[in-house]
Image (cartoon, rainbow, N blue to C red):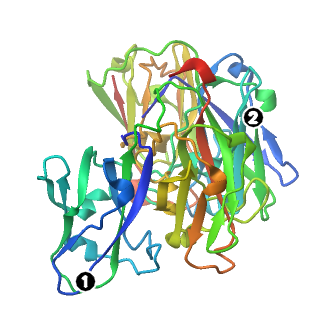
Amino acid sequence: MNKLVSGAIGVEVKLRVGINKIHLPDVINLRGKRIKHIDFCTYDNLQSTPSGNAIIALGVENGLFLTMVEANTQTELIRDIPVTQLNSNGNRLFIDKIIDFQMSYITVTNSNTSDSCYMIFWYDEPSVWGIVNMNDRTAIQPLEIKLIGTKTFFKENRDLLQKKYQNIILSNQLLTPNGANTVSSSFWGNKFLTLQFKGLQFFSQVPLYLFYQANQNFMLRLQNIQFDMQNSYIETLTTTADDLNTVFFNAIIDDNPVNSKR
Amino acid sequence: MTTIQNVACLELEITPDEKRVSFTKDIFKYKKILGIYMFRSDDVAQMLNPSFTGEINNNADFGDISLYLNLTDIENNQFVKDLSLSQFILSNNKDTSPEKIFLESKINRVLNFDQSFLVLKTFNFTKFKTLIYVLYQSQNFTPQDDTVNGSITITINGEMYNDNKDVQLSKFVNKELNGKKIKQIISTGNQDGYLDLICKNHIIENVPIGIFDIRNEKQFLLDNVEIDFEKSFYRKRNFQHFNPHASTTYLTFIY
């Protein structure tokens, strides 16, 4: 089962021809965060990074191994794990460590590409989350956004104002309840979701496809996080007519009486 | 993982004029609804519904239809608004849908069915037939124990039961299973058809056999039900295509 998370950040790692050890970049927003899970994106799901660089061709990932250094002890507690093991249909490894990103690296066994890897680090931020109990009452609300360009902000939704999110589920139906055409799943591979709260990007450039969960063994679990939807957005790298349709989600939100917790 | 106590099967025929589709049964009154699923046939073929009155639309038909679920509880809170139902669809074909792509439905409320409905959006269709499965609770669940105390597997020979027909389960099951508290059924082989289980204190109505072929984290278990095999039926419903390699159905009853 996936662990509760309060955010996720996408990180691009560009490979270089002839270089067998590529260090991860320093990501300020991940400093000191406890990493719960990692997803490694493959070309069949994601074709470009947010910067527009091509994702490594399918199969290249078989020669990549991730080593992560724990920040506190500076030891390689996770050494040479095949990145393919980070793709597990939602049955994600529970990492539960604070990582020193600059000391962590990818080992490349056949370094003949300069394409990019894209990894998602799901993390915990105790200062923002709320308590989530297994038997909590939840409600489900629609959340939709009509893409109008490379970066489209959500409109404020009164039904979701100040609500605590436990999941955001991407739908793959052709029409929304209002009859608008949706973005086909074949166009999800270059779209990224960023969700902010009080000026901080708790979800930063997370590939849209990761929110489609019917094909996953376990659903995402958000830790009763609030979002400022007007400051949250979806980015798309292409803006064809097929790209600029509506993205429809269902948000699972906490539905307990306000004073029943904390 | 979902533990089944009772299942009601509703056969729906939806026409383009119906933008809102109601679904209910008297038996749901004051019962806690645990989950709601739809059923579709496989990618290429259609399967007759349990009552022989029509064929369930297949995957291709579903592609043009968008369905959204709206639920209101008995305190008149609309707690589910426009839930995309496409991810709560069970399919009967393990060959075309080996991963059983669906989300687990977790409702867990007593519903006001007068205010609960499906919203339909579509490009074009004339008539649409589907099955809605409502999982509900009628008493406290028994403690779960995944120990296999014993199992009996029955074989339903496809050559003998090739036609669409209803057959009493007692024709396949010996008396050893009478009174046993069944905690799981596992199906393998041919998945064409339904199981209609009348149990002591519970009813599991016309569930597609294929749901018992799910053996991952989304599997369906039973709440230690005592099946009356005289009153329970295997309802064979062939696909339009016939797959001779999977003509035999094996059902393993675990207690």
Relative to the observer, which residue lies in front, B96 or A3?
A3
- Three-letter amino acid code at disc 1? Arg
Residue located beneath label 2 in the image: B23
Chain letter of the residue beneath label 1 in the structure image:
A
Q: Position of residue B243 (x, y in %)?
A: 45, 60
Disc nearest the viewer among 2 and 1? 1
Residue depicted at 26% across the width and 67% down the height: A24
User: Which quarter of the picture shows residue B106?
Assistant: top right
Chain letter of the residue beneath label 2 in the structure image:
B
Quadrant where the N terminus of chain B is found in the figure: top left
User: Which quarter of the picture shows residue A144?
Assistant: bottom right
Q: Position of residue B126 (x, y in %)?
A: 81, 59
Q: Is residue A50 placed above or below B250 in the rendered structure?
A: below
Question: Is there one chain holding both mark 2 and mark 1?
Answer: no
Q: Is residue B115 placed above or below B17 in the rendered structure?
A: above
Residue depicted at 38% across the width and 24% down the height: B183
Residue A254 visible in rendering? yes
- Three-letter amino acid code at disc 2? Phe
Residue located beneath label 1 in the image: A16
Provide the secondary structure element on which disc 2 rests. Answer: loop
In the picture, measured across the screen, residue A19 lies left or right of residue A1, that is left
User: Which quarter of the picture shows residue B108?
Assistant: top right
In the picture, measured across the screen, residue B115 lies left or right of residue A245, that is right
